[in-house]
Image: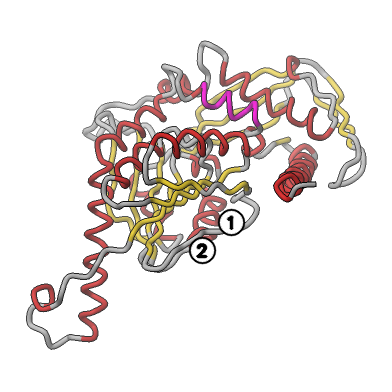
């Protein structure tokens, strides 16, 4: 067997084991739940790409607009931060100099390598890569995702479209496992966690993910974090964002989000040999104001029993669903400026600058690892 095939088989085996463990954990809990990373098999990744083009799903457009408008500002801010850090570090050694910035020779800026968690097909990331390729002669981009198909598409598309960009994809579940970050000499890492992916996790889980990422970075590296903003209270003088805008984004008229939600059951049938009937589950999306999150559920339309054969996680499971009983499949937390700052600070990052779209629907925050 060729080494690449053996590696792919190893990855697929590892992913299937993780699917089995998550299905057993979530479907034997009360209430029943499944982790949202299970959405992103090949079919789920394609459905999500369709979701991002829907008129109701503003998140992708708002974030792409931020990148298009502010990509140069993002990299200029990073370069400015590096100059300040270099001067401060050198100033500790030359504290008697009256004017440090004038007395020291200019220091070369380190090149940036970009690492992206949950990259998918990297449809928005190309905007940033093009902007960076205009500033340095070569760019190393390291996308990380659990979907080999999505990474293959990103690899082919971006390397062909952007001269000077080298793609080194990594198939890994960054939520439950470790990742490898390649770093050359005199290189600074910019980690991307965009698309509001951080919102799929509870506050404690989100901190754990960012702390795990921070442990793999060096002081002075940076993070670009994309977050969907919570509906604004009336006293805030910005364009109104109402819960109805949020609900429409997760319950589109075309039914693509419903198909995306049900596909998680199709995946369990395929990967684990389960006998779910996805058409017997209804897609539900609701706004939980007290927890500042959209919740997605699959509601059983009838009393039914589902079987999952014995697998690496344990013996045969026989699951009963009452009529109206739900599987909680996803949370999408929405953030305020204060909660973004608190999350980053708790994870050993210092927020540097935040960019928003004109309607204040979405935020992208640049932060420095300390």
Task: Choose the circle earlier in sequence order: 2 or 1.
Answer: 1
Is residue 151 inside the magenta stretch?
A: no
- First to last magenta residue range: 42-50
280 relative to 40, above or below: above
Residue that appears at 41% across and 58% down: 189
Assign a secondary structure to mark 2: loop
Q: Position of residue 341 (x, y in %)?
A: 36, 53
Can you tell which mark lies on residue 216? Answer: 2
- Residue 21 visible here: no
Q: Position of residue 5 (x, y in %)?
A: 74, 44
Q: Is residue 39 left or right of residue 128?
A: right
58 relative to 127, above or below: above
Residue that appears at 55% across and 56% down: 208
Q: Are marks 2 and 1 in contact (CB under 8 Å)?
A: yes
Q: Position of residue 168 (x, y in %)?
A: 52, 49
Can you tell which mark lies on residue 268? Answer: none
- Taking depth in this image into account, of 217 and 149 the one nearest to the observer is 149
Q: Residues within 10 Å of mark 1 (few under 14, many from 20)?
A: some
Residue that appears at 24% across and 30% down: 358
| Chief secondary structure of the magenta portion | helix
Is residue 43 inside the magenta stretch?
A: yes
Residue that appears at 25% across and 34% down: 235
Q: Residue furthest top?
A: 254
Q: Is residue 4 left or right of residue 85?
A: right
Question: In the figure, residue 302 lies in which quadrant?
Answer: top right
- Taking depth in this image into account, of 263 and 289 the one nearest to the observer is 263
Can you tell which mark lies on residue 179? Answer: 1
């Amino acid at each position: 067997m060729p080494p690449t095939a053996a590696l792919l088989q190893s990855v697929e085996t590892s992913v299937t084991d993780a699917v089995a463990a998550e299905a057993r954990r979530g479907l034997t809990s009360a209430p029943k739940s499944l982790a949202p990373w299970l959405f992103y098999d090949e079919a789920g990744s394609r459905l999500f790409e369709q979701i991002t083009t829907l008129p109701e799903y503003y998140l992708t457009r708002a974030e792409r607009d931020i990148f298009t408008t502010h990509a140069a500002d993002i990299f200029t801010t990073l370069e400015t931060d590096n100059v300040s850090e270099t001067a401060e570090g050198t100033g500790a050694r030359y504290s008697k100099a009256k004017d440090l910035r004038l007395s020291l020779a200019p220091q070369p800026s380190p090149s940036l390598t970009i690492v992206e968690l949950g990259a998918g097909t990297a449809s928005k990331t190309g905007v940033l890569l093009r902007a960076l390729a205009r500033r340095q002669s070569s760019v190393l981009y390291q996308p990380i995702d659990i979907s080999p198909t999505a990474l293959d598409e990103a690899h082919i598309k971006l390397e062909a479209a952007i001269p000077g960009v080298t793609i080194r994809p990594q198939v890994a579940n960054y939520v439950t496992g470790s990742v490898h970050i390649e770093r050359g000499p005199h290189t600074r890492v910019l980690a991307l966690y965009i698309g509001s992916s951080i919102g799929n996790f509870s506050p404690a889980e989100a901190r754990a993910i960012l702390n795990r990422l921070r442990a793999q970075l060096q002081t002075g590296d940076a993070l670009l974090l994309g977050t969907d903003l919570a509906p604004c209270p009336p006293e805030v003088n910005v364009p109104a964002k109402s819960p109805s805008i949020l609900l429409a984004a997760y319950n589109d008229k075309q039914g693509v989000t419903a198909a995306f939600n049900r596909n998680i059951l199709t995946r369990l049938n395929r990967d684990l040999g389960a006998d779910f009937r996805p058409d017997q589950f209804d897609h539900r999306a609701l706004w939980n104001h007290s927890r500042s999150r959209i919740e997605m559920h699959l509601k059983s339309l009838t009393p039914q029993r589902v079987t999952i054969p014995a697998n690496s996680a344990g013996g045969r499971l026989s699951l009963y669903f009452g009529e109206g009983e739900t599987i909680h499949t996803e949370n999408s937390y929405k953030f305020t400026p204060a909660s973004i700052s608190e999350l980053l600070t708790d994870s050993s990052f210092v927020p540097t600058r935040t960019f928003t779209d004109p309607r204040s629907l979405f935020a992208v925050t640049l932060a420095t690892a300390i």
